[in-house]
Image: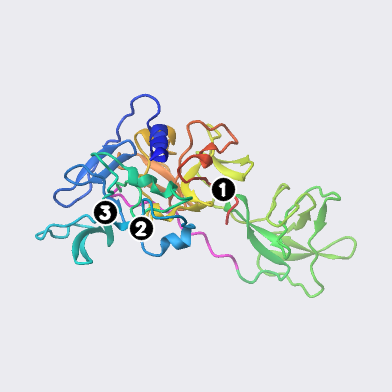
Amino acid sequence: MKRIALITAVLMAGAAHAEMAIVKPPHMPPGFRIMQTARGPVMATAQGMTIYKQLPKGRAAKQVEVTGECVFQCPSEWPPLKAPDDAKPVGDFTIVTINGVRQWAYKNIPLETFAFDRKPGDTLGDDTHDFNGPRVPIGEAAWLESDVPAEKPAAAPPIPVGLPPEITVRATTGNIRVFADMNGMTLYACAPCGESWTPLAAGALARTGGDWSVLARADGTRQWAYKKQAAYTFAGDKKPGDVAGARPLIEYQAGWPEAVTIAETEMGPVYAEKVSGKTLYYQGYNHRAYQFLGFNGGPFSNCANACAEVMPPLLAAADAKPVGEWWLFTRPDGTRQWAFRGNPVYTYRDDAPGRHKASYMGRLWTEVLANVP
């Protein structure tokens, strides 16, 4: 319990916090209510006890290594949220029967309470993944979803086919796709070019096709060109995917929001808030989205109230549009938040530019790396 007390103290640090207002309460079964907690607004029972979604079977083994004795993962500690005999489905809320017990479910996901929540507003079940290094709970984080669907950008176009055999496409920092040679080294246009630049040689049988053409060099050799720009590799690139030179030959670039930039940290390049330079985070594990938080098919507000004082959400302007891998979704209070690959992103109050302190906090906050395909 010391671990829970420590994390709760971190979230509750500082002055009194403003509660997130609910613009449009979701359609819920009779007896359900919205409860404000330090974590944010949650769906709760008539008695105010937080409702949790059950972790899908098989996900724990695939996502993290679960070790140690059962502490907060025993089924007896996650009582099913029973449905009365006369209960009827309401919207996305349905009734399932598990082991002979009629139980509420949301989008076919069984709902539960947590035996260690002692009073209305407790969300201790949200911290159980911190135990036994780590242990994933059957119930997931306290939650309240927005009824507004996430805004998603158009999908990136497919990598073109029919490229010359000496040329490939590789994703690099910011998930920009650049042309590369067969060794994965980025190709560039350069002017002027010095000794650090090596022409991309074209074979004797190479032929012009699409945006690629063959140039005859003054020394009698042949060189590939993209849109009439001679293609080179750069000696400053040390490994495949590096883009140390100027003017890379870009195959596709969707970009990222105006509010976002790329910053360097000891972990490598990360996405950061442009104004403050602070690293952006989502709730994840080993730099992968923590799927337990959004497995029902979309992002939702999982950090508000005191949590949002520690981890401020990266809010979007009213006229913002989704771009590249960046989505937009509406929080329950009507504000809009940026999400990377469908996962809401936040900064950390005590960070400085180039730092990533939240990675070492008790929760699974993970910096959003800009160089992970």
Q: Nearer the viewer, residue 276 or 69?
A: 69
Mark 1 vs mark 2, CA separation in Å: 26 Å
* Membership of 157 in magenta stretch: yes
Q: Which residue type carries mark 1?
A: Leu
Query: Which image quadrant is residue 252 in?
Result: bottom right
Reading the image, the residue beneath label 1 is 369
Q: Is residue 73 left or right of residue 26?
A: right
Q: Which element type, helix, strand or loop, lies under badge 2?
A: loop
Mark 3 vs mark 1, CA separation in Å: 34 Å
Q: Which element type, helix, strand or loop, lies under badge 3?
A: strand
For label 2, the crowd category at 10 Å Cα-Cα, with few meaning under 14, some 14 to 19 and many 20 or more, is many
x, y (%) of residue 259? 50, 38
The image quadrant where one finds the N terminus is: top left
Reading the image, the residue beneath label 3 is 112
- Foreground mark, 3 or 1, reads 3
Q: Which residue type carries mark 3?
A: Glu
The image quadrant where one finds the C terminus is: bottom right
Q: Is residue 253 left or right of residue 338?
A: right
**Which residue is painted at 26% across and 45% down in the image?**
50
Q: Is residue 212 left or right of residue 150?
A: right
Q: Residue furthest front?
A: 69
Q: Which residue type carries mark 2?
A: Leu
